[in-house]
Structures are given as structure tokens and as C-alpha cells.
Image (cartoon, helix red, strand yellow):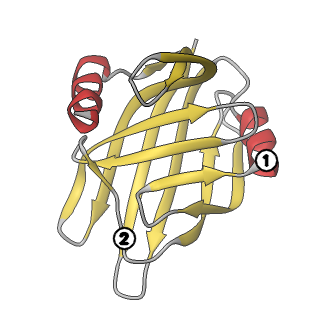
Amino acid sequence: MKNAIILLVLSVTMTMNAQWTKNFYVDDFGDATTDSYESFITGGTFSNSATQNSKASYKFIRNDDSIVINVYRYGSSLATSTKATFEDLKVKQPDGTIVVLKSVFFSKGGYLYFNKEGFVEFNNVISTKGAYVIIFDRTSKYSTSSYKIKFTIK
């Protein structure tokens, strides 16, 4: 059920315009709690040895002290791997400045995780209104996948 909802949200809201929206966590019964988080979904591409510039989706989830970016290859499959890695992200800001975020955790489950320190840094990097591009790789012993996220903060 949860995956079906994610797929529906991804297909309905695929947009290059990113606006943080407030959401609420749910309890075991599916009822909204008072605990909230913000999120947005945007698009981009990914490439690896099997495909070039294929569709990808990215869901940004932010709470009080962390940011997670779920990485969906082909717009629906989490970019899972047999090993977690630490990757450098390059962020092109609206004014053309490029900022490198070092050693961002890319989980086996297919998401990028910014801890408390990374949370503050990443929030500062994407704090200005305008168009952003983020590029990063996932490097393993046997292959490399490349990812590109494009979004505009309004």
C-alpha cells in the first residue's frame, strides 16, 4: 500500500518546481500525529552501464535535524545497493556557484542522508530562490552510477 501511494504521488507531482510542503507522520492506525516534516518531489536523470540519462525521481524529506533524499531510478525503484557508500555532491546554485558537499551517506536502501551537520550545510546551500542542479555518483567495486537532480525553489 505504501509503495502504491509513493508511486501515485511520484506520477502526479513530477515537477521541476520544488516547494516544501508540510506533512504529518502517521501512527500504527494510519492516523496523522502532531509530528510533522516537510517534503517535495522532483525529477532528474541517472546513468549506469545499462542506461544513459534515464528518468529518475527524488523525494526530499526534511525534519527538525536531518534531510533524506530518496533516489528512485526509472521514477519508481529505489536505488538500492549491496553496500552503503559516502559520496560527494556538487550543487549548482541559482547564481552559478558550485558547492561541494563532502561524504554524504548513500544508504543500501537507496537514499542520501544528511546528518545534523550536513543538514545545516545543505539547508544553507539551497536557501535561495531559483534553479538548482545537484550531481553525484554512486561508486562501487564493480560499477558507477551517476545521478542528476534538477529543481527550482520558489
The residue at 58%/11% (across/down) is 154
Above or below: residue 22 compared with residue 125: above
Q: How far apart in space, not on screen, are marks 1 and 2 (Cα)?
A: 24 Å
Q: Position of residue 25 (x, y in %)?
A: 53, 25
**Residue in the foreground of this view, choosing between 150 and 32:** 32
Marks 1/2 in contact by CB < 8 Å: the verdict is no
Give the image quarter of residue 61: top right
* Up-down relation of residue 89 to residue 22 (above or below): below
Q: Is residue 144 left or right of residue 85?
A: left
Q: Which mark is residue 81?
A: 2
Mark 1, secondary structure of its residue: helix
What's the residue type where badge 2 is placed? Ser
Q: Earlier in the sequence, mark 1 or mark 2?
A: 2
Considering only vertical position in the picture, is 45 above or below 127? below
The quarter of the displayed image where residue 44 is located: top left
> Residue 116's mark?
1
Q: Quadrant of residue 140?
A: bottom left
44 or 34, nearer to the observer: 34
Give the image location of residue 58, x and y in percent.
41, 39
Q: Residues within 10 Å of mark 2 (few under 14, many from 20)?
A: some
Q: In percent of the image, x 58 and y 23: which residue is there?
A: 38
| Residue placed furthest toward the bottom | 141
Q: Is residue 120 left or right of residue 70?
A: right
The residue at the far front in this view is 29
Residue 64, percent from left and from top:
74, 31
Residue 6 in the image: state x and y as whole percent: 29, 31
Total count of labels? 2
Residue at the (45%, 34%) spot, across then down: 150
Q: Residue at x 74, y 42 (%)?
A: 119
- Label 2 sits on a secondary structure element that is loop
Q: Quadrant of the N terminus?
A: top left
Q: Residues within 10 Å of mark 1 (few under 14, many from 20)?
A: few
